[in-house]
């Protein structure tokens, strides 16, 4: 073995060892009590481990101009302190844009409690209560009482007591130094919140209580009176307490909020996604199952069809997967469920490169070249097509990352890493393995199967018929799409709340509908998914807390778990829809520019027309089958655009090559020849990728079902448009046939 080859083999072996070392142990292990036994190297997304993803908007509209400058930073610090004391590990708090904050809480499933802790402003005030009965009556009748306003104290038994409360606070929460939960020594030991004031606050509190013995002092939190005790005597100790009908958790949470301090401005929940642990565990199982089945199908096909060369491709594919996981571990990336979909898709796309190389080697062998010469020529001549196809898909992945959010970004990350690694594993590593086999094991020939023989079909002659067929199918699909209107869009794009519940026993739809009608939500969308125990409910308002309470009350004998809750504000939904459209258009523009750069403008426009064809076909299929559009569908459409252009580029590359080699014939003849030469390759590459997409469709779980369905339609349409749309359209840019002499 020559020294150069030795170094190459050693580099591959060392890389594999390094990847395994960086990955192991891949995932966090926990005991029966949920305690971490062993910390994993790869972080799981909230959609896999369960938890909450919340986007908060800080409303600074009522703040002074100077106070607005650091309001977001101060709000982030307060929220971080609250979550720290709440006891959530591995939380993530990030700023997004000018006025938004993203909060991610792994493992948190008590959404009401978490939202209360995160979102409560916690502006604490102590206000005197007037005992003037006549003034109180005036205030209740909406008559102005100077310096006072009416507020209501919620009673323990549901009543409301009107109080005439001073508009100006005698004391505020910024003088607070501590708040903790204690228990009353009288009665049943009810919990209350004990407050400790700083010296300045203690002095003010002492003066206020001394001057108002016998009066009531209202304790107001975020504009709501939580208690109004009578001042029995002066309180010089700087100690106060908030009592009421608190549970222990409520008292603890209020203590946490008050200790962390008040938010500088109110926050609004713009977007919230909660995934229960049951759905997270099911997503992991579905993702792993789909990955194993998809990989097994690809491995089996490659070994059966390409024999020894197929086994070499499988080794390169395993190294590719190791590199993806190692990069996630090294750069602290997060593996999400769409990220697993990206991993599965990478398996199919990575093998595409090997198919292109092997089919080129087959052609070189038919020309009578030796195996070594054929391998060298095959790798050299296939490289430009492999590079082009990977770059166009990476362009689409970059736009998914830019305009996507949450788990969808995980898809873009794993797909990009996989495609970049593919340029190394499928091109360089397989070449090294073949060099090793030829030099050390005297490999003299390669045996391939050939299911698709060379054809001589007049594709160009049938182009007008295909144009008409495509137009009819697209118009039919888009007609259904526009007829459905807003029903096309999921909560990501239209706003509202989606709630998914899993009941212990089968549940009747009319019973669920009745409960919703009693709540004034008779127009809510109800759908049973998978079986009669799972229910998906979609409403415009967030009623999940009240609805869960109604289920517990009216379906006492049928316990349930919350699998998923997604809430998106209408403004956010509109913004996401705009971003989705922009990302699609930018993706197509980016591909147009790249193809134009690699070939010319005519080729680029023809290719992009074919991409619009594939996207419209997929959109129509989704509309006809009643599937809704969300962020995962946008990711699928961009993936279709990036992938479908691959086959088109391969044929364009062959057309360009034949224009140099073929001495006679019109452009139509050369295009026909090129399409026929590449037909088997086009079907093979898409077919191998379809194996993993079908595995994703059948075994990937309900979360990725629409995504996989969209890819299936788009990829099939991509083969058709490459042959019957993109290639023939090149002729449309020429006024007369081109002849070579």
Image: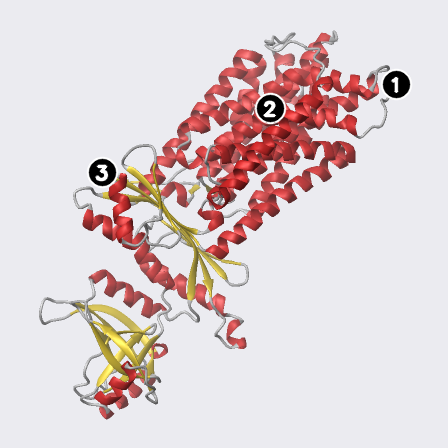
Extreme bottom residue here?
Answer: 211
* Picture disc at residue 352: 2
Q: Which is nearer the eye, 628 or 296?
A: 628
Q: Earlier in the sequence, mark 2 or mark 3?
A: 2
Q: Quadrant of residue 392?
A: top right
Residue placed under numbered mark 1 in the picture: 740
Residue at 52% from the left image edge and 16% from the top image edge: 301
Q: Earlier in the sequence, mark 1 or mark 3?
A: 3
Residue at 61% from the left image edge and 39% from the top image edge: 396
* The C terminus: image quadrant: top right
* The N terminus: image quadrant: top right
Front: mark 1 or 2: 1
* Picture disc at residue 504: 3
Q: Which is nearer the eye, 576 or 285?
A: 576
Q: Give the Cα separation between the discs numbered 2 and 3.
A: 45 Å
Element at label 2 = helix
* Picture disc at residue 289: none
Residue 61 in sight here = yes
- Examine the rendered structure and indicate whether residue 10 appears above or below residue 304: below
Q: Quadrant of residue 267?
A: bottom left
Q: Quadrant of residue 562?
A: top left
């Amino acid at each position: 073995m020559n020294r150069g080859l030795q170094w190459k083999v050693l580099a591959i072996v060392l890389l594999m060892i390094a990847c395994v070392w960086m990955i192991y142990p891949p995932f966090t292990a926990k005991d029966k009590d949920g305690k971490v036994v062993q910390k994993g190297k790869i972080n799981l997304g909230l959609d896999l481990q369960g938890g909450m993803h919340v986007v908060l908007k800080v409303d600074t509209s009522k703040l002074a101009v100077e106070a607005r400058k650091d309001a977001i930073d101060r709000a982030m610090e307060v929220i971080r302190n609250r979550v720290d004391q709440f006891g959530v590990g591995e939380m993530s708090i990030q700023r997004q844009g000018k006025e938004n904050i993203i909060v991610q809480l792994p493992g948190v499933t008590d959404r009401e409690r978490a939202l209360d802790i995160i979102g409560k402003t916690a502006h604490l005030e102590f206000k005197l209560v007037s005992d003037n009965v006549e003034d109180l009556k005036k205030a209740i009748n909406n008559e102005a009482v100077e310096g006072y306003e009416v507020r209501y104290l919620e009673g323990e038994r549901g009543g409301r007591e009107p109080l005439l409360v001073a508009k100006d606070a005698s004391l505020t929460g910024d003088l607070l130094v501590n708040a903790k939960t204690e228990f009353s020594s009288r009665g049943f030991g009810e919990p209350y919140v004990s407050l400790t004031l700083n010296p300045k606050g203690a002095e003010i509190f002492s003066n206020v209580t001394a001057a108002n013995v016998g009066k009531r002092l209202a304790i107001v939190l975020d504009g709501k009176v939580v208690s109004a005790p009578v001042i029995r005597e002066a309180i010089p100790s700087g100690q106060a307490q908030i009592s009421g009908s608190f549970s222990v958790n409520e008292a603890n949470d209020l203590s946490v909020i008050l200790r962390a301090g008040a938010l500088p401005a109110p926050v609004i929940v713009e977007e919230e996604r909660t995934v229960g642990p049951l759905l997270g565990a099911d997503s992991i199982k579905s993702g792993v199952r789909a990955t194993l089945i998809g990989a097994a199908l690809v491995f089996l096909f490659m070994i059966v069809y390409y024999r020894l060369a197929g086994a070499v491709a499988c080794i390169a594919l395993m190294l590719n997967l190791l590199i993806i996981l190692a990069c996630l571990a090294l750069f602290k990336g997060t593996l999400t469920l769409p990220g697993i979909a990206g991993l599965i898709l990478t398996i199919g796309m990575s093998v595409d490169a090997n198919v292109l190389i092997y089919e080129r080697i087959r052609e070189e062998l038919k020309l009578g070249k030796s195996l070594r010469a054929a391998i060298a020529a095959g790798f050299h001549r296939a490289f430009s097509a492999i590079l082009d196809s990977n770059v166009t898909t990476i362009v689409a992945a970059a736009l998914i990352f830019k305009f996507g959010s949450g788990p969808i970004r995980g898809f873009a990350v794993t797909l990009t890493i996989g495609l970049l690694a593919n340029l190394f594993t499928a091109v360089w590593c397989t070449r090294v393995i073949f060099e090793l086999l030829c030099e050390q094991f005297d490999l003299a020939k390669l045996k391939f199967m050939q299911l698709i023989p060379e054809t001589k079909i007049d594709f160009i002659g049938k182009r007008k018929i295909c144009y008409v067929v495509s137009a009819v199918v697209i118009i039919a699909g888009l007609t259904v799409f526009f007829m459905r209107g807003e029903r096309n869009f999921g909560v990501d794009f239209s706003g509202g709340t989606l709630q998914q519940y899993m009941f212990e026993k089968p549940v009747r739809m009319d019973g669920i509908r009745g409960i919703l009608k009693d709540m004034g939500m008779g127009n809510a969308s109800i759908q049973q998914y998978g079986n009669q125990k799972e229910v998906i409910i979609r409403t415009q308002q967030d009623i999940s807390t009240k609805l869960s309470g109604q289920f517990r009350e009216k379906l006492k004998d049928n316990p349930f778990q919350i699998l998923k809750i997604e809430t998106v504000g209408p403004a956010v939904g509109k913004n996401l829809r705009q971003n989705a459209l922009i990302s699609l258009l930018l993706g197509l523009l980016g591909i147009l520019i790249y193809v134009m750069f690699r070939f010319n403008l005519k080729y680029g426009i023809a290719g992009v027309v074919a991409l619009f064809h594939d996207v419209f076909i997929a959109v129509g299929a989704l509309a006809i089958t009643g599937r809704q559009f969300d962020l995962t569908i946008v990711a699928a459409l961009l993936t279709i655009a990036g992938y479908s252009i691959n086959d088109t580029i391969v044929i364009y590359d062959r057309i360009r090559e034949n224009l140099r080699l073929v001495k006679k014939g019109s452009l139509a003849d050369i295009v026909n020849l090129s399409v026929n030469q590449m037909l088997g390759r086009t079907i093979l590459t898409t077919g191998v990728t379809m194996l993993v997409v079908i595995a994703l469709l059948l075994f990937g779980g309900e979360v990725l079902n629409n995504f996989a369905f969209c890819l299936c339609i788009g990829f099939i349409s991509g083969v058709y448009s490459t042959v019957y749309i993109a290639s023939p359209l090149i002729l449309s840019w020429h006024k007369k046939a081109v002849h070579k002499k």
